[in-house]
Amino acid sequence: MPIELEFPVVRISQDEFHVMDEVFTGLVFQTHNELGRLCDEKIYQNELLGRAERSFEATKKEFRITVRYGQFAKTYRVDMLLNRSAVYELKCAEALAPRHQTQTLHYLLLTGLHHGKVFNFRPERVEYRFVSTRLTPERRYEFCMDLDRWQDRDEDSKWLRTTVAALLNDWGAFLDFELFYEVIRFLRGGDEAVIRRIEMARDGHSLGGQKAHLLNPVTAFKLSAVTKNIAAFEDHLRRFLALTSLECIQWINFNHHQIEFRTISRARQ
């Protein structure tokens, strides 16, 4: 199976989640009040595990989700799974950031669950964000690949297109695009083979070097999840390309159900 869960999960309604969440949030605040705000995540996790096991029938710490493709395998660990039905992530950061919610949403999509929450123990008062989705696993496979502006400029470009299409068919859309970067790097021989330093210059004046994802010496690739101002993002890719000796950037944008494949070259296509 391309996505393997440690054990089966159970979807619940929003009302059922809020009843459960009210109890667990109370345990989180108690833990924060008693342990303070300076402990590591594992300390809060272990303390909450004991408290949650007394309040819920099924509580799992570091619930495992494994994503596979060929020889590639990546295992995620959800900080806390309550009653096989709700995902909780525990953080110790200066402040919650969008990446924390993105991570939790990624876990919801992989499990097929709908409700989760992120807690941050570091501030004076516990910080939290609800994370939810109505997407079902079935709907994640209802995607469309837009290839109108893509060119198979070389065999590497063709490989990228067919590989991403195969990954989408296996895993579905809406997942964190960083996972796609990771498997592509793995299949191409690792980070050192793919992430290379390229020289940047303007009007004959060297600006230094910058790392980029390369398929070969003249073809870079970019993955993104831009849903607004897509034309502006493309313009920035063109500006970047103009500073390099690259021939093109193969850009794949995960725009919800629409996966956009575009070849960005020096001359508009």
Image (cartoon, helix red, strand yellow):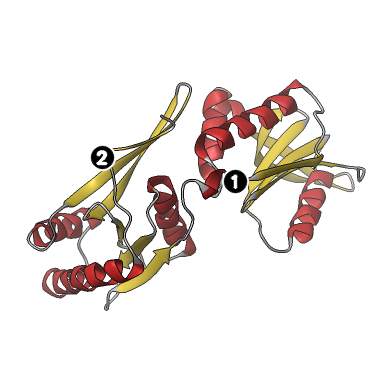
Give the answer, above or below, for where 170 lies relative to 33: above
Q: Nearer the viewer, residue 22 or 209?
A: 22
- Name the amino acid, label 2: Phe
Disc 2: CA contacts within 10 A as few (<14), some (14-19) or many (>=20): few
Of marks 1 and 2, the one in the foreground: 1
Inspect this view and state whether residue 231 appears: yes
- Residue at left offset 82%, top offset 49%: 238
Quadrant of the image containing the N terminus: top left
Residue 266, located in which quarter of the rendered image?
top right
**Callout 2: SS:** loop
- Residue at left offset 22%, top offset 67%: 20
Q: Nearer the viewer, residue 79 or 196?
A: 79
Disc 1: CA contacts within 10 A as few (<14), some (14-19) or many (>=20): few
**Label 2 belongs to which residue?**
7
Residue 218, located in which quarter of the rendered image?
top right
Q: How many marks?
A: 2
- Residue at left offset 56%, top offset 45%: 173
- Name the amino acid, label 1: Glu
Q: Position of residue 64 (x, y in %)?
A: 29, 41
Q: Nearer the viewer, residue 269 or 42?
A: 269
* Left/right of residue 33 with respect to residue 187 in the rendered view: left
* Left/right of residue 180 with respect to residue 1 in the rendered view: right
Quadrant of the image containing the C terminus: top right
- Residue at left offset 43%, top offset 61%: 101
Residue 22, located in which quarter of the rendered image?
bottom left
Question: Which residue lies most toward the left here?
Answer: 54
Q: Position of residue 52 (x, y in %)?
A: 13, 60
Q: Position of residue 119 (x, y in %)?
A: 31, 66
Mark with earlier residue (1, 2): 2
Q: Which mark is residue 142?
A: 1
Inspect this view and state whether residue 190 appears: no
Q: Position of residue 13 (x, y in %)?
A: 34, 64
